[in-house]
Amino acid sequence: MSAERTLVSDVGSILKVALPTPLQQIFDYRWQKKSVGITPSVGARVKVPFGRSTRIGVIVEVCQKSEVSAQRLKNVLEILDPGPLLDSEHLRILNWASDYYHHPLGEVIAATLPAWLRRGRPASLPMPRHLRLTDTGRRVDVTSLRQAPKQAAAISRLAACKEGSSRSELNLAGEAWGHTLRRLKEKGWIEEVDVELTSPSRQKTTPPCRQAPELEHSQRRVIEDISNDVDRFHPYLLHGVTGSGKTEVYLALIEQVLARGKQALVLIPEIGLTPQTVERFRTRFDVTVSVIHSGLSERERAGAWLMARDGRAKVVIGTRSAILVPLHSPGIFIVDEEHDTSYKQQDGFRYSARDLAVVRAREAQVPVVLGSATPSLDSLYNVEGGRYRQLGLPTRAGGAREPAIRVLDVRGRPFNAGLSSEVLDALEENLARKEQSLLFLNRRGYAPVLMCHQCGWVADCDRCDAHLVVHRARHRLKCHHCGHDRLLPSKCPDCEAKVSPRGVGTQRIAEVLADRFPQARIARLDRDSTRRKGELEAVLADIQSQRIDILVGTQMLAKGHHFPNLTFVSVLDADGGLFGADFRATERMAQLIVQVAGRAGRSERPGHVLIQTHHPDHPLLHELLEHGYPAFAAAALAERRAAGLPPYANIALLRAESTSLDQCFEFLNDARECTKMNGHGEVSILGPVSAPMERRAGRFRVQLLVLSHGRSVLQRFLKSWIEGVNRLKSARRVRWSIDVDPQDMI
Ligand code: ADP
Ligand code: ZN
Ligand code: ZN
């Protein structure tokens, strides 16, 4: 750093600007009154020269002094916001996150800003085009559209709001509706208009206020407990069995928050954010509900973000990234299915949305509710330590009973493509009763392996340490890790003998079932069957309206869906998570089993569940199935404690990736040497070792694990260590990253 200092007098100031660059650094720029009209404020965006181009950043400090010499100091090109776009509370949270996750503040800020604002577009302007009925459209008799149900649906939704609304607010976004809307426009029944979001005459999109059910005693108690003390920070873990009415509890709490003029932020797992869920929030309250998800257009996203920031949106619902949205007057933070792994960002800025929700609640001094039927061991540990308070909903709402779970020891039994005769019998009975069944298998595709019976050849990915998965319908072999995809061979490339698929995936199950039950209506729900927009919604709607008898799917099924007529569930392979390389594998498996089983019997008809396993005596599986999730969690926590693993320890991973394995090891060995110079006896370093999947997409992956018994000890260590790692020569030859509280060891 230069010893020279630049002092700027009353003709201007120094602006410290956070820019989206990988450098852990804030940049100084000069601002001169005469050159740029607007007065700079902390939290406003600026356009600045950077290298040979320009960038947009956010002012984090306005001062008079700089360590940069006057000659090297560049001028701000433009101040984009007349006032702060981000207030000081939000900047404090982003600063905290940047420190804690050791990620540059400029990139953290960029992650919170919608692309629209990141690109420097005005913060006051997003005027989304709204759809509304024309006068002719208003006179259309919907019942005459029986042949065109989608047109009828669109017309009824539009009829509910005079002023019109955006496509996504009307649930008319996406390709699935594009054709319908074009037809309606051609008929002259609908039109698109510019609507200023701030317009006070803006109407609700749906008829408001569907009544809440009469709450059960246990629901009321939970609500009272939380609403007793709403002006202070309190983290709650709401452990409610599946179907216990957690969402009703959230709704009641939000109602109180709204009555006090404050906002609520609700996080939902990626796959759980369905129109069904959003509808439940929209129809309950007479306020603007902003939904933030990846399907929004840039404009819509910016609009939703600004409405949340200005306090016009009273309820904000969204997936992981919604936790980064600023709020005007937060009153409560709610994280539904808090155990869900989609809350952890797996690349770039690797934050945990669940943990940030707690940080934001603390900053705002309001309650935060983490809800789940299968709480994470992390949160249970926080309950154990007195940091979170646990509240419970021990029974299902509305008189529904929890399903009876039976373990099926499938060792040595006849198996038809992964289906035991008990499961087939249960399916047959359920079909006869006209009730729905669900089969869960966490493996998409037709078969996980293609093999030659003559010579033992197996189809592997050239770029990953993984087998290629057979996708028979499309005649493809696909790598589920790097996306590599090629034609399905009919002969072994080594010996020319016939090759055959081994093992089962969801496609094969669906095929076997179609063969066995030709009259049954079978649907598949996995990433392959729902890749296109609207497909997931379509399948979910088919299940709701009982156009499907048997549903086969992956973990997409586990996420909070409510299928009233579903009475039989089978987990086809409970063994997948028992011997995984990741120490969290059993926790994940237990959560999946309970969540999937929880889809059964959620209404009047009782449900039953069959779990197929080759390891009925596995102690943790036994604990789960005999004594339930709390007993499992206690046993699993005891194991973690004995092994000194999280949550009883805090960990961070330094990951390296390169096309050269040696360079990865060289860098991580150097990084390990660095730890000695830092002289911290309080952390243990493990590795470097190859990641469980050593090669992925053509790159080798090696990691170094840092483990400590105190969060602050680990933080202090990481801070000085990463500075050292940054200076290593070998660091320039690999792609490296630090992951604090990693959720996946792969
Ligand atoms: P969870 O979020 O715990 O899975 P939900 O809130 O979705 O549970 O409730 C499950 C079902 O029970 C829903 O159909 C909901 O409408 C219904 N329900 C919730 N609370 C009550 C209640 N107090 N009385 C009757 N039905 C209820
Ligand atoms: Zn062969
Ligand atoms: Zn691959």
Image (cartoon, grey):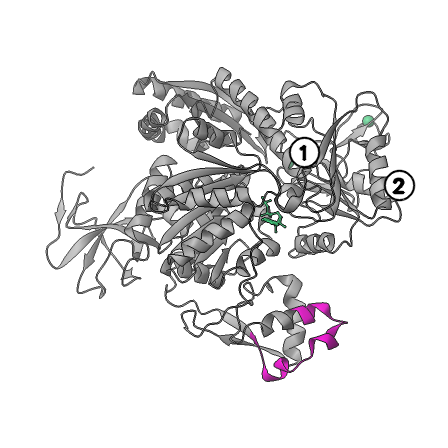
Q: Position of residue 709 (x, y in %)?
A: 39, 21
Amino acid of disc 2: Arg
For residue 516, the mark is 2
Q: Position of residue 564 (x, y in %)?
A: 70, 49
Question: Which of the marked residues, 1 or 2, is nearer the chain's N terminus?
Answer: 1
For residue 679, the mark is none
Relative side of 576 to 213, left or right: right
Which residue range is magenta in the image? 132-153
Relative side of 84 to 200, left or right: left
Relative side of 566 to 126, left or right: right
For residue 461, the mark is 1
Label 1 beta carbon within 8 A of ligand 3: yes
Asked whether the viewer can see residue 480, the reply is: no
> Label 1's element?
loop
Find out whether the residues at labels 1 and 2 contact each other: C-beta distance under 8 Å: no
Q: Position of residue 528 (x, y in %)?
A: 69, 46
Mark 2 surroundings within 10 Å by alpha-carbon count, few (fewer than 14), some (14 through 19), many (20 or more) = few
Amino acid of disc 1: Cys
Task: Kindly identify the residue that appears in the image at 41 percent across and 53 percent down.
Answer: 257
In reply to whether residue 303 is colored magenta, the answer given is no
Relative side of 636 to 78, left or right: right
> Label 2's element?
helix
- Give the image quarter of residue 179: bottom right
Asked whether the viewer can see residue 743, the reply is: yes
